[in-house]
Amino acid sequence: MTLIDGKAVSAQIKKEIAEEVAQIVAAGGKRPHLVAILVGHDGGSETYVANKVKACEECGFKSTLIRYEADVTEAELLDKVRELNADADVDGFIVQLPLPKHISEQKVIETIDYRKDVDGFHPINVGRLSIGLPCYVSATPNGILELLRRYNIETSGKKCVVLGRSNIVGKPMATLMMQKAYPGDATVTVCHSRSKDLVKECQEADIIIAAMGQPNFVKAEMVKEGAVVIDVGTTRVPDATRKSGFKLTGDVKFDEVAPKCSFITPVPGGVGPMTIVSLMKNTLLAGKKAVYKD
């Protein structure tokens, strides 16, 4: 069993990005600039955004954090998005989700200029991904692809089960795993809360990508010997023994599943660090105008 070390891979990629940024700046080019908008004080969002800002520093990017209280109006937030769209110094920006109930996430996503949408959530980026055109790929699926690539995990012709059908992970992950490329060329099945034979599907899978948000959902009896298991789940489960008061728990019951796997990602330290580094990669692409020229 090989433990897929997302922390080590992400550190290596940040180093590669920092070297490239240093070369760009030395040649008189512009330092990539990422802006993050954070609304309210959701604990998870606070952590994610702090990690994103820290990663920007490590990559040599310029970063700006814009904060709003949870009672900000939708109109005010959309005005700020339009302002960032028009700001030539800003290469890419993200609006941290989830947003308060009174703000339409979809409206915010669609207002972002798709050329600066480094989260890869805009329908234009999603559509381009689905037909194999250059675009910003959403960060978590892109991070998983990078792990498969760096660990030389075979995907061609393999049966891949994606658990979950969210717009952020499940759907793009399924699209990427069946594209004509490496990683890809897999036979993909998407399972979700309405699926009938979910356990049987998992038992037949060479690769399981678990992104349901249900702690310890994938048990040993659902996984065949030698499978590759990628755990995207990060649920905060209360744990009185920890200083933070919670334990980050994946969708896979790690202790019992790991011995059966050829490769498995831990939680934390697996997919999580890769999500942030993928956002950094998209920001670098945006700074270089590598995906969209104008």
Image (cartoon, helix red, strand yellow):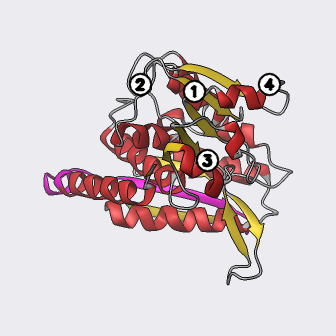
Density class for disc 3 (Cα within 10 Å; few <14, some 14-19, many ≥20) is many
> Which residue is identified by label 3?
232
Q: CA distance from mark 4 to mark 2?
A: 35 Å
Q: Amino acid at mark 1?
A: Cys
* Pointer 3 or 1: first along the chain: 1
Q: CA distance from mark 3 to mark 2?
A: 24 Å
> Which residue is identified by label 4?
197
Q: Residue at x 69, y 69 (%)?
A: 247
* Pointer 4 or 2: first along the chain: 2
Report x, y in % for residue 162.
Answer: 64, 31
Q: CA distance from mark 1 to mark 4?
A: 15 Å
Report x, y in % for residue 61.
Answer: 35, 59
Q: Residue at x 35, y 46 (%)?
A: 284
Q: Which residues are magenta?
A: 23-41
Q: Secondary structure at mark 2?
A: loop
Front one among 12 and 73: 12
Residue 96 visible from this viewpoint: no
Q: Residue at x 44, y 19 (%)?
A: 133
Density class for disc 1 (Cα within 10 Å; few <14, some 14-19, many ≥20) is many
Front one among 161 and 174: 161
Q: Is residue 10 above or below residue 210?
A: below
Callout in the foreground (1, 4): 4
Q: CA distance from mark 3 to mark 1?
A: 15 Å
* Pointer 3 or 4: first along the chain: 4
Q: Amino acid at mark 2?
A: Pro
Report x, y in % for residue 12.
Answer: 30, 56
* Pointer 1 or 2: first along the chain: 2
* Pointer 1 or 4: first along the chain: 1
Residue 215 visible from this viewpoint: yes
Q: Which mark is residue 134?
A: 2
Q: Which mark is residue 160?
A: 1
